Image (tube, rainbow, N blue to C red):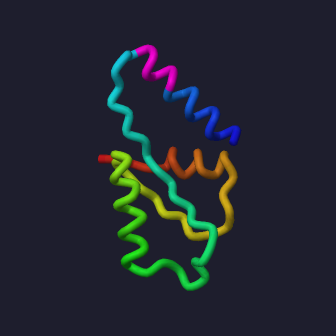
Amino acid sequence: MMMFNFLSSNIYVRIWKNRITAFKPNLVLHPLEMIEGGLSQVEGKVLRELGATFGSPKVIIHLGPELSGSDVMDKIKTIKVV
């Protein structure tokens, strides 16, 4: 919840300072249940399209141990969008 509060307050500051902002966040999706065998191609595509629906230029799907808030921020910082 703390990560959400930080991100939401950061978004609010950007919108308030610029009045109108084209904010397109990078997105890390981390499914936690029913992924024992990995994701099928269809499931992966659905998750990427879900991210694209939010206008994200880059969507990362993490299939591994549960991420902490700092781990998510580290993953986002390593994204290189061209």
Magenta segment's dominant SS is: helix
Residue at position x 63%, y 72% in the image: 33
Q: Is residue 21 above or below residue 40?
A: above
Residue at position x 57%, y 35% in the image: 7
Residue 41 highlighted magenta (yes or no):
no
Give the quadrant of the N terminus.
top right
Tell me where residue 57 appears, x and y as whole percent.
Answer: 34, 48
Please indicate whether residue 50 sits to the left or right of residue 12 in the image: left
- The magenta stretch is 12-17
> Residue 16 lies in what quarter of the image?
top left
Residue 15 highlighted magenta (yes or no):
yes
Tell me where residue 47 appears, x and y as whole percent.
Answer: 42, 64
Tell me where residue 18 appears, x and y as whole percent.
Answer: 38, 16
Residue at position x 39%, y 48% in the image: 80
Tell me where residue 31 appears, x and y as whole percent.
Answer: 57, 66
Q: Is residue 78 above or below residue 61?
A: above
> Residue 22 lies in what quarter of the image?
top left
Q: Residue furthest left?
A: 82
> Residue 32 lies in what quarter of the image?
bottom right
Residue at position x 64%, y 34% in the image: 5
**How many numbered callouts?**
0
